Amino acid sequence: LEEEDNYKHIKFTDMLFDNPHAAVIRNLQECSGFMGLPFNVYYKNGKVAKATTSIQNREQITEILDSEFSK
């Protein structure tokens, strides 16, 4: 995300879908109906705040970040 500097209070990570550690994400109830990749899971205070599938555009991502993680 090019605007990552605007979200210094958020930690961004990525993980390959077939990584064994990704089973945590693949098995989430919030992702159970997802049929496509990528999955995007947004955590807040250790809980899923939002989960999306398919490619999200910049506007969609920043809308989620602003609504779920505003300072």
Image (cartoon, rainbow, N blue to C red):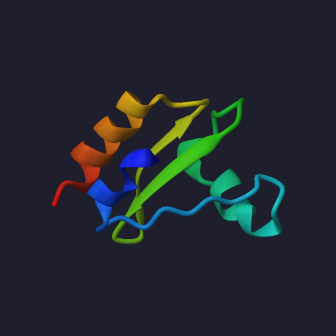
* Residue 16 visible in image: yes
Residue 34, image x and y in percent?
Answer: 65, 34
Residue 49, image x and y in percent?
Answer: 37, 53
- Which residue is at a point 36% across and 48% down the rendered structure image? 3
Screen quadrant of the C terminus? bottom left
53 displayed left or right of 67: right
Q: 3 and 20: which one is in front?
A: 3
**What is the residue that sits farthest to the left in this orientation?**
71
- Which residue is at a point 51% across and 37% down the rendered structure image? 52
- Which residue is at a point 55% across and 46% down the rendered structure image? 40
> Is residue 68 shown above or below 60?
below
Residue 37, image x and y in percent?
Answer: 70, 36
- Which residue is at a point 72% across and 61% down the rendered structure image? 22
Which quadrant holds residue 36? top right
* Residue 27 visible in image: no
> Is residue 66 shown above or below 13?
above
Residue 62, image x and y in percent?
Answer: 33, 40
